[in-house]
Amino acid sequence: GAVVSQHPSRVICKSGTSVKIECRSLDFQATTMFWYRQFPKQSLMLMATSNEGSKATYEQGVEKDKFLINHASLTLSTLTVTSAHPEDSSFYICSVMGSTDTQYFGPGTRLTVL
Amino acid sequence: SQQGEEDPQALSIQEGENATMNCSYKTSINNLQWYRQNSGRGLVHLILIRSNEREKHSGRLRVTLDTSKKSSSLLITASRAADTASYFCANNNAGNMLTFGGGTRLMVKP
């Protein structure tokens, strides 16, 4: 399966700052990546579908101007949380769509906004 | 994406026992997948069962699918302490998007 990395694994920032999270597909060319958010002891909620070379598709209730997604290459998608607030503190996970209907997940990024 | 439901939400068993987790979903599906998540980590794909399949095995894992009831179950046999994790089902419908269930937190006591 595809190997997916995320950077950083953990970030703490002050309220009002922006944070960029990278998702890399290390051994697979990914035209489609997904971004999820997971609050403690809850399930994953899909935030958006990231498409290489085009605009991301956001799920209902997810602000596209707050969560900026850029998928400029087949191996990299970035999620920028703009003007972060404490309620944005969460575990952000990306995934890559593989060739057999399976998604391969990154290790996640723990964001804490003070 | 609307979540499916999983039960139980939490399960505690002794090593060597079997663990059964159930999942229900709401829409028609192409396939249903089970994932495992260790605390604070990403998800690991365990097994995929297609809508025209009823049962699938992989090592100590057995998955069933009942499309008439829109439900699936994951059985882990002869559980080990290392199986302690959260387990999520996810159904795959149009567009290859996954809709995750609420998850079952499994604790296997040595």
Image: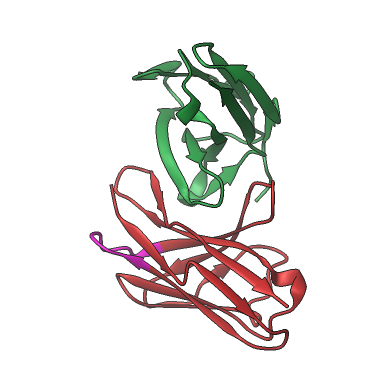
**Residue at the location (45% across, 16% down)?**
B54
Q: Which chain is green?
A: B
Q: Position of residue A8 (x, y in %)?
A: 46, 72
Q: Which chain is red?
A: A
- Specify the segment rendered in magenta: A24-32
Residue B4 belongs to magenta span: no
Tally of numbered tags: 0
Q: Position of residue A13 (x, y in %)?
A: 64, 81
* B91 displayed left or right of A6: right
Q: Position of residue B9 (x, y in %)?
A: 71, 31
Q: Position of residue A97 (x, y in %)?
A: 38, 54
Residue B68 seen in render: no
Q: Is most of the magenta stretch helix, strand or loop?
A: loop
- What color scheme is it? by chain
Q: Nearer the viewer, residue A60 or B90?
A: B90
Residue furthest toward the left? A27
Residue furthest toward the front? B110
On-image quarter of the C terminus of chain A: bottom right
Residue A79 versus residue A38 in the image, above or below: below
**Residue at the location (48% across, 77% down)?**
A55
